[in-house]
Amino acid sequence: MSVTSPPLAAGGVESEVQRIRALLKQRHFAEAVDAAAALRGAYPENRDVLYLLALGLRHARRTAEALATLEEFERHHPGASLLYQERGHCYVVLKDAARAIEAYERAVQINPALPATWSLLEGLYKMVGNEQQRQLAAAHAKKLQSTPPEVVAATALFCDGELTAAEKQIRAFLLRHGNHVEAMRLLARIGVAREVLDDAEILLAAALEMAPDYLELRRDYACVLLDRHKHAEAIEQLDRLLKLDPQNIDYRVLRATATVGLGDHEGGIRGFTAALADTSPRSRLAADLHLSIGHSLKTLGRRTPAIEAYKQAIAARPKFGDAYWSLANLKTYTFSDAEIAQLEASEADPSTDELDRYHLCFALGKAHEDRGEYEESWHYYERGNALKRAASRYRAELVEQNTARQKQVCTHAFFRERNGYGAPSREPIFILGLPRAGSTLLEQILASHSQVEGTQELANVPRAVLDLQGYDPDLDNPRYPGCLVAMAADEFRALGEKYLADTRIYRSGKPRFIDKMPNNFRHIGLIHLMLPNARIIDARREPMACCFGNLKQLYARGQEFAYSVDDIARYYRTYLELMEHWDTVLPGRVLRVHYEDVVEDLEGSVRRLLEFCELPFELACLEYHRTARSIRTASSEQVRQPIFREGLEQWKHFERWLGPLKEALGDALSRYRERRHEPEAGPRRSVPVR
């Protein structure tokens, strides 16, 4: 086969790769190198081809060429552990112990399930006199030797991103051998990677019952609890770990993160700052700690020190996309010419990883927008969205199918038959809708009232939905919402009481509190059955403004519908469809508040909100921007200022590029103002509960 050979069919590539592996195994190195070089001509980015070519070149004693091939490998596949393992082998050949150690350390950082690499590190550490690291490497090697080979192999697949193959292999092992702690831990890690966090929590809890002294397992469990917003439970696990190892910086950082999750930002800042004192100032960890400090300072409204923290994060890691985006996401920060030049250079650098790159793109979009350079701005917003969407597993049809099921199950008759179900509390006020629709403004207005507490975007309702979905849910044929039909009155009451109990930790004792999770609009039926006397407010914004606001927003997590024109338009239309359904089957249950109306008539809108929530008028609600409180959303700086009209039609600066969005939204452009059942004026009568 020559370098100019036409591309092979997929099966042909695999068969040729297997042939090259066989040649290497037979020590026919020159022939293997020729075959791999020819195959690279047709498939220059193929991971297996680049790896086998480098391997063959090293065995053929062409080490410099092998290292050059590995540099090319790194450009295309920077997260592959075999790349760094092979680089370490090359430096061993060159008798460069320092570089070999650096390469091997990177390999096991990515993939700890490389027993041969740990053994090589053990020998190299011994050679350079690093006894502490030698012992650590020896312990890793010994642990892998005592782990079943099938689990080691599945772990290696997982660490190299082969989730499907790893899951298939580890499930087969568990079926054959029954419960095994390492196998259960790996399956839980796969669950976390797939965002199936409830399954991961169950697996790790069961594994801890079998191995309560396994510290890494307990650490994994604490991380899953954090991801599920079970901050108090995470702190309980982390305190157990810190009792055994009080100086462990990883445990300390996680403890500070959980503290922030409970709303104690001052405590979190103290924890992050203490960890910084024990961290190298130019390390990735130092950058992450400065970023976390900045986020907490921003939430507390301390803008100037937040900016300084974000800049320190960039000083620690100059291409740190998240830190640049955090500056842009303040909405009030202006980048200098020098900063924009550095942003553009970092984004264009081929060695910048994808996570940093799309953060840099969104920051550049905001920087150019603020300068009125709308074409450049749209270029970067569009590029950032494309990169983020490519990394997402979002499926719009699943949301649409769930909407159809909600409409099928949650009928007027369904609710009439269940009148009076749920816990009777009037404490919760749900503000929901789409992100970037004004919900933070409504929250700030209501949280300025003496009887109302603002919390955050609480994950408790989505978590209840996950629990109703059950273990290992089938996303194409889910149990929820169909399972609601078979549930009894006491089950809904228990869900409501659990919600109230679990959210109490975010509150300080005021009579009412706000849950501002926007996606809760998908679960209004469940909320009504759990908490029939809760107030529900739909924050709505004109479709073009709302969808454009989402397209230029990079979310810390979730909201995966926001990264393409088609996805956000479909989501907005689905939102309208479902809200129209709730209006029909639960007439008057939801108060709709249009952002544009609040801007044009603040006092009238405030009085309408307070009347719906059965709260007396207080002047502080009109002066909401003076209220000092923690605000964790993207609009945190904006709602600390008086209301402004300039933001109503910012999207029109980009209108020439938004034709596809208008077309995709269709009649939603006019339909969003329609209202079938407006809540009656005056206090809403509480629903008697059985």
Image (tube, rainbow, N blue to C red):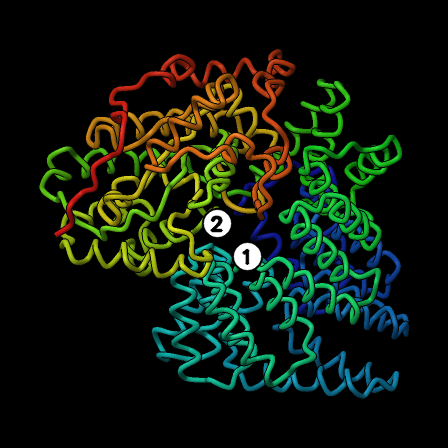
473 displayed left or right of 414: right
**Front-lying residue, 391 or 287:** 287
Assess disc 1: are there few (<14), some (14-19) or many (≥20) residues with their C-alpha within 10 Å of its C-alpha: many
Task: Tell me whether circle 1 and circle 2 mark residues in contact (CB < 8 Å).
Answer: yes
On the image, which quarter does residue 331 sit in? Answer: top right
Q: In the image, residue 551 lies at what x, y percent?
A: 57, 29
111 displayed left or right of 63: left
**Front-lying residue, 61 or 419:** 419
Residue designated by label 2: 455
Mark number for residue 17? none
* Secondary element at tag 1: loop
Which residue lies at the image location 83% right of the left edge and 71% below the top edge? 100
Q: Is residue 630 above or below residue 407?
A: below
Assess disc 2: are there few (<14), some (14-19) or many (≥20) residues with their C-alpha within 10 Å of its C-alpha: many
Q: Is residue 133 above or below residue 10?
A: below
Which residue lies at the image location 60% right of the left edge and 79% below the top edge? 242
**Front-lying residue, 456 or 347:** 456
On the image, which quarter does residue 386 sit in? Answer: top right
Q: Compute the Cα span from label 1 to label 2.
A: 8 Å
Mark 1 vs 2, N-terminal side = 1
Please name the amino acid that badge 2 sits on: Thr
Is residue 1 at all visible to an observer of this figure?
no
Q: In the image, residue 517 lies at what x, y percent?
A: 44, 43
On the image, which quarter does residue 130 sit in? Answer: bottom right
Q: Quadrant of the N terminus?
A: top right
Residue designated by label 1: 263
Which residue lies at the image location 49% right of the left edge and 23% below the top edge? 602
204 displayed left or right of 386: left
* Secondary element at tag 2: strand
